[in-house]
Amino acid sequence: MRMMIFGAGYSGQAIAAEALKAGTHVSGTTRSPEKATLLAQQGIKPFLFDGTTLIPALRQEMAEVTHLVQSIAPGAEGDSLLTLSKGDLRALFPRLEWAAYLSTVGVYGDHGGAWVTEETPCRPVSQRSVERVAAEQGWQAAADGAGIPVAILRLSGIYGPGRNGFVNLVQGTARRLVKPGQVFNRIRVEDIGRACQFLIERQLGGIFNITDAEPAAPQDVVTEAARLMGVEPPPEQDFDTAELSPMARSFYGENKRVSNAKMRNLGFHFLFPDYRASLAQLWSDNVWKP
């Protein structure tokens, strides 16, 4: 197996870590030479990719890839790899056996706090979620054309070592915004890596919600992190009067509870099924820091 991760950032590196444990050769792309050095230190063969140009060394590596993970978000112009391949994955990856596309639970849109599953129709609200739905459909069509399974991983709010409520509290950026009835799901980055490896080992394709099992109000998560740290949480703020960027405010326009039952019914075990257990582990094992 030879895996390539396009956009080997926070989630991509967690996927790489699990693949490396399994003895897979892993390469990954990044935009900056500094991040390329970081990837190499983790055992990931780095390549620079600006989203539009495939350098000869990268093309040569792609020709040997058997397992592909696309983690680069699409833009208004579409998905970078689908654009470069014109939808023909075999043109760039002749040995490809399996692919994954990292999407978001944002594709479901707003469901007024109701539960959603992989069968729930997508009703994207934000432009970025509209672009994600188009990319999902493009990847499904391209995979069908290549005769391979593609796993669409719909991820909820990603956190873990270096990116969590403890870091926000230390840096003074934590806020307890209160919008009655609002809940979000979350996912530990390590469980993204483990879920991807689980699907690879079973050669499974389809749509999968990669998320925890306890949708919760965002202010409750901040409160729990502060309790574990032994500090006072920031004061509650009313969402309607809070100063927020348009993007931050748009997240609160979508309210839903996302089910992970499909993955669990396949036999996948989430190491961090809820934010309480996850925060407790980050704190007790002292792995919360960047």
Image (cartoon, helix red, strand yellow):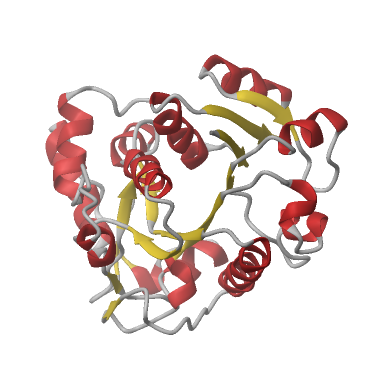
Residue in the foreground of this view, choosing between 243 and 50: 50
The vertical placement of 257 against 155, above or below, is: below
**283 vs 219, nearest the viewer:** 283
- The quarter of the image holding the C terminus is top left
Relative side of 130 to 218, left or right: right
* Residue 41 placement: quadrant: top right
**x then y, percent, for residue 256:** 31, 75
For the question of whether residue 216 can be seen, the reply is: no
Instruction: State the image coordinates of residue 210 (x, y, percent, origin top left).
Output: 35, 57
For the residue pair 247 and 211, the one nearer the viewer reads as: 211
Res. 153 image quadrant: bottom left
- Percent of width and height locating residue 99: 56, 52
Q: Is residue 228 left or right of residue 159?
A: left
Residue under the image location 63 percent in, 23 percent down: 45
Image height check: is 166 above or below 125?
above
**Residue 81 visible in the current orientation:** yes
